[in-house]
Image: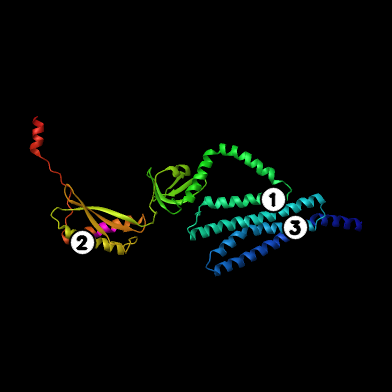
Amino acid sequence: MNKDLLLRFSSLAGMFMPLIIFILVLFIGLIVKKVILNRLLRWAKKTSSQLEDIIVGAVKSPLMVLCLMLALYFAVQFSKLPENIVQVMSKSILILGIISVVLALANLLSGLIKLYASRIDSTLPVTSLTQNIARIFVFSTGALIILNSLGVSITPILATLGVGGLAVALALQDTLTNLFAGFHITVAKQIRVGDYIKLESGEEGYVVDINWRSTKIKMLPNNLVLIPNDKLNKAIVTNYYLPDKEMAVLVDLGVHYKSDLEKVEKVTSEVAKSVMTEVSGGVAYFEPFIRFSAFGDSCVKFTVILRAKEFVDQYLIKHEFIKRLHKRYIQEGINIPYPIRAINYEQEKAKLRS
């Protein structure tokens, strides 16, 4: 009886031992993973470079896969499974290992692209399109390596993809058109993420992202406009950040015909200079100037030329300039006339009689 019980216990232990080992190793692995991540995070905080943060972010997911892979490996080693099942498990462990490496490389490459593309004037600016292209390349390479490790010949697959690619291209013509248009926009760098642009159709705002299908533009009222890349590639676009962010700010004004234009020019220039040096967004080194342009119906017209650091700064500059100039004109006795219309009563009466 005791012998039968021992045999049954031994049989049950043999059945549940791999599961127990799997759970135990996985538990230990998760604890080690947490310790390693905490140390990596402390190490990253001590340095000023963002490279360490990218490395920590890249290994988070792969460490979990690695723990699972180790748990499976030790469970298989202590199991009495049939040979064919052991082979399947071994291949599964290998696939998990490849997946962990691919995840780490994809995360690392995406982070490095984002880091270094923002620091240098690179050929391929950082957008979700460029990051996704890098991820697709890494994942595709990893998938081919997995298939090759399983004994699947990848040569026929590549040939099939080449033939099937033509059919897919025809079926997804619009999608591929937007994809390549987005790639052209990214590489040409005439429209970049962060630029303030205006379309011929009237939409304007900051370029938030360029993805595989559309370009996202955030308008000043905080609305998001999605423009298909192909349409944006063909549209007439004004980029207020090229060749640089600084831009001229023109303010049209007019003064009474009896005004001393020399005094008007002097006073206006003084106010404009104070705005340039004191108001946020003004270009302090720029010397404002005015240009008289025409004799209007009720005033002498002129334009004041100011300068802003970027497009949205012009609104505050105009606001402060008009306020200060109005106050100064009142102090100096410079008159800004109301529009005047003269009515010839005799001529109007003659028209009515006829």
Q: Position of residue 331 (x, y in %)?
A: 18, 61
Q: Position of residue 4 (x, y in %)?
A: 90, 55
Residue 237 position, x and y percent, is: 40, 46
Tag 1 secondary structure? helix
Q: Which residue is mark 1?
A: 146
Q: Which residues make up the magenta segment?
A: 320-324
In the rendered image, which residue does mark 3 sit on?
A: 73
In the picture, the quarter occupied by the C terminus is top left
Q: Residue at horizontal 69%, vertical 50%?
A: 146
Q: Whole-percent x and y of residue 40?
A: 60, 66
Circle 3 — which element?
A: helix
Height in image: 52 above or below 298? below
Can residue 20 be seen by looking at this rendering?
Answer: no
Q: Earlier in the sequence, mark 3 or mark 1?
A: 3
Residue at the image position 57 percent from the left and 67 percent from the top: 44
- Give the label on residue 267, or none: 2
Q: Secondary structure at mark 2?
A: helix
Mark 2–mark 1 Cα distance, whole angstroms, equals 76 Å
Q: Amino acid at mark 1?
A: Ile
User: Mark 3 against mark 1, which lies toward the viewer?
Assistant: 1
Mark sitting on residue 56: none
Is there CB contact under 8 Å for labels 2 and 1?
Answer: no
Q: CA distance from mark 3 to mark 1?
A: 18 Å
Task: Characterize the local packing of mark 3: few (<14), some (14-19) or many (20 or more) Cα atoms within 10 angstroms.
Answer: many
Foreground residue, 345 or 161?
A: 161
323 inside magenta stretch:
yes
Dominant secondary structure (helix, strand or loop) of the stretch shown in magenta: helix
Q: Seen in the image, is 279 located left or right of residue 50?
A: left
Q: 10 Å neighbourhood of mark 2: few (<14), some, or many (≥20)?
A: some
Q: For the residue marked with disc 3, what is the amino acid?
A: Tyr
